[in-house]
Image (cartoon, rainbow, N blue to C red):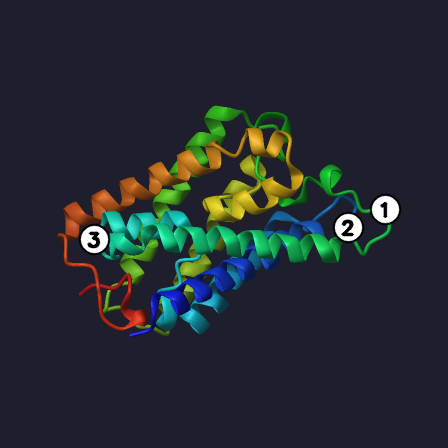
Amino acid sequence: MTSLSKRLVVEGAGTAWLVFVGCGSIVLNGAAPQPGYGVLEVALAFGLALATATYALERLSGAHFNPVVTVGLAVANRFPVRDLVPYIAAQILGAVAGTALLAYVANGRPGFDLAASEFGANGFGDHSPSDYQLHSAVAIELVMSFVLVMANLLMSRRSVSRSVAPLVKGACLALIYLVAMPVTNGAVNPARSTGPALFVGDWALDQLWLFWAAPMAGGIAAGVLHALLWGKPRASHGAAGKHGEAA
C-alpha cells in the first residue's frame, strides 16, 4: 500500500501537470490573433493531459486530480472519507504550483500582462469568453461536473480495463471543454479554477465561488446517483492503485 504522503505528492503533481498543460494552451500562444488557441486545441490539451497523467499515476493515487472527483467518489463510498481533506489540499497546492510555473514561463514574453490575458481564469458575465451570464455558467458547470464524476465512477470499476479507462476519462474531459470553454473558459475542477484566480485576483477571486459551488453540487449528485444505482460498496483500503475502485 502506498503511503498517504506519497499519494498526496502524486495527486499534487498530476494536478499541476493538468493545469500547466491545459491553461498553458490558453496562455502561451502569443502568435495567435487573440491570446490562446482555439477551443478544440484547448479541449484536446486538457483531455490529453488528464489521460497521460492517469495512465502514469493511477496505480499510485487513483488519479483524481480534481476535488470534485474526490468528493464524488467519497459520496459513492468509493474513497475513504478520512483522506478527503488531504487529497483536496494536495490538488489545490498542485494547481497553484502549475499556475506559478505557467506564470514564470509566460512572463518571458515581452509585453505579457497577466491580468490583461485573464490567464486562463474562469468567469461569467463580462469575463465569460462569449459573455454568458450567471445562470448559463451554473448550468454548464453543474451538468458537466456531474458527467465527469459519473464517467470517473463508471471507469473506476474493477471490471473496466485499466488500458481503456484513462483514455475514456481524457476523452470525456476534452468533450466537456469543447462545450464549456465558450461559457466559462472551462472549469469543472475547483483546483484548476483556484490556481489562475489567485494569480489574476480581483474579478477572478470574486467569481471563484461559482467554480467551487456548481461543480461540487454536480459531483455530489453523481456520487449519490451512482450509490443508489450500483449500491454502496466499501471504499477500498488496499493498494494505493485501488483507491476509487469497486467491483
Res 117 quadrant in image = top right
Looking at numbered disc 2 in the image, what kind of residue is underneath it?
A: Ala
Q: Which element type, helix, strand or loop, lies under badge 3?
A: loop
Where does label 2 land, which residue? 32
Q: Three-letter amino acid code at disc 1?
A: Gly
- Of discs 3 and 2, which sits in the foreground? 3
Which circle's residue, 1 or 2, is located before the other in the chain?
2
Whether residue 196 sits left or right of residue 143 in the image: it is right
**Residue 17 placement (x, y as % from top left):** 55, 62
Residue at the spot 28% in from the left edge and 40% down from the top edge: 221
Res. 54 image quadrant: bottom left
Q: Which residue is mark 3?
A: 77
- Cα separation between marks 3 and 1: 49 Å
How would you rate the neighbour count of disc 1 (Cα within 10 Å): few for under 14, some for 14-19, many for 20 or more?
A: few
Of the two numbered discs 3 and 2 on the same chain, state the one appearing first in sequence.
2
Q: Earlier in the sequence, mark 3 or mark 1?
A: 3
Q: Residue at x 50, y 43 (%)?
A: 187
Is residue 29 visible in the rendered image? The answer is no
Task: Please name whichever residue, 138 or 17, is drawn nearer the observer in this view of the structure.
Answer: 17
48 on left or right of 80:
right
Picture residue at 25% right of the left edge, 64% below the top: 245
Q: Residue at x 48, y 67 (%)?
A: 53
Gap between marks 3 and 2 measured at Cα: 45 Å
Q: Circle 1 is placed at which residue position?
A: 111
How far apart are the two marked residues, 1 and 2, measured between alpha carbons?
A: 15 Å
Decide if residue 143 is on the left or right side of residue 191: left
